[in-house]
Image: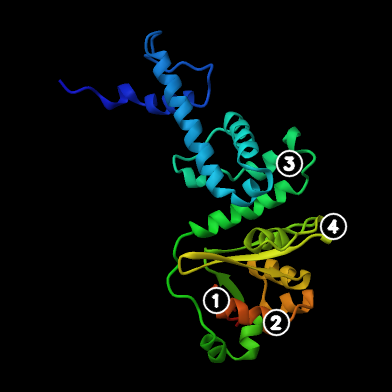
Amino acid sequence: MLTSPTRYEGLLDRFAASLADDASTPCGVTAETRERVDIYRNNVRLNRIAALTDAFANVVQLVGAEYFRALARAYVERTPAKSANLHDDGAELPAFIRGFEPAADLPYLGDVAEVDWLLHRVYFAADSGAAADSSALAELGPERFAAASLRFVPSVGLARSAAWPIADILQMHADGTPAHLGAGGQSVLIWREAFSVRWQALGQAEADAMAALMTGMAVQAVFTQTNADPSSLLAQLFGHRLVLAIEEPIHEDRH
């Protein structure tokens, strides 16, 4: 006789939820099998901590592996996973770090974690197909391009810190160049090229322009507002094939 699937509706969800809550006992667990649930709980936490360690490499380099494991364990214990995909785990870690009392004397750590998370998400971003190239600019002409907006590939992002030199910290971990915390806030353009994640420091005007372009603002309005050098930034965006499409405004016919 077949058993109705509704009998087990929600059972796996309740069991999964109990793995993040030591005080919860899944339905059907007995005193003899409770210890096995604890093994599952520990394995889930260890897997999440390992995934976070991989995703937040620059934070790990700043604080050391042992410190980061303690921080990640606290995060895992207080922040339930929202996805079965470990690559999705960590979005809330930067905010968690900013409120983590033991890290209060490392005020830059949350911003570095933001950079790490963006590096991680850019690496795993979906492929977008063919990007627009500079020949599209010639087809449009200056006036039409100035009124258009840019849509970017999924594997590009902008990290900004108002107070901390995030680009210098990345460079320090890349080649050992010392980073000075007093250098002030910096911005970093991050993208995936082939199978590698790359980054480039941007000046404030360029970062302002990039942030505005990512909102869909018209090209001319962006560079008028920010006073950034359009030739330099656009050459980089099209040269690295980061623009997915050039979108012209829709004009309704008026009669």
Q: Position of residue 178 (x, y in %)?
A: 75, 60
Q: Nearer the viewer, mark 3 or mark 2?
A: 3
Indicate the amino acid at tag 4.
Answer: Gly
Residue drawn 43% across and 23% down? Answer: 39
Quote the CA–CA distance across marks 1 and 2.
Answer: 15 Å
Label 4 secondary element: helix
Quarter the C terminus occupies: bottom right
Q: Earlier in the sequence, mark 4 or mark 2?
A: 4
Discs 4, 3 touching: Cβ within 8 Å: no
* Residue receiving disc 3: 98
Q: Which residue is mark 2?
A: 230
Q: Secondary structure at mark 2?
A: helix
Mark 4 / mark 3, whichever is N-terminal: 3
The image quarter containing residue 147 is bottom right
Task: Determine the residue positioned at 69% across, 60% down.
Answer: 172
Q: Which mark is residue 70?
A: none
Identity, as a three-letter code, of the amino acid under mark 2:
Pro
- Spatial CA distance of label 4 from label 2 is 29 Å
Which is more foreground, mark 4 or mark 3? 4
* Label 3 – label 1 distance at C-alpha: 34 Å
Q: Residues within 10 Å of mark 1 (few under 14, many from 20)?
A: some
Q: Is residue 128 left or right of residue 67?
A: left
The one nearer the camera, 93 or 196, is 196
Disc on res. 182: 4
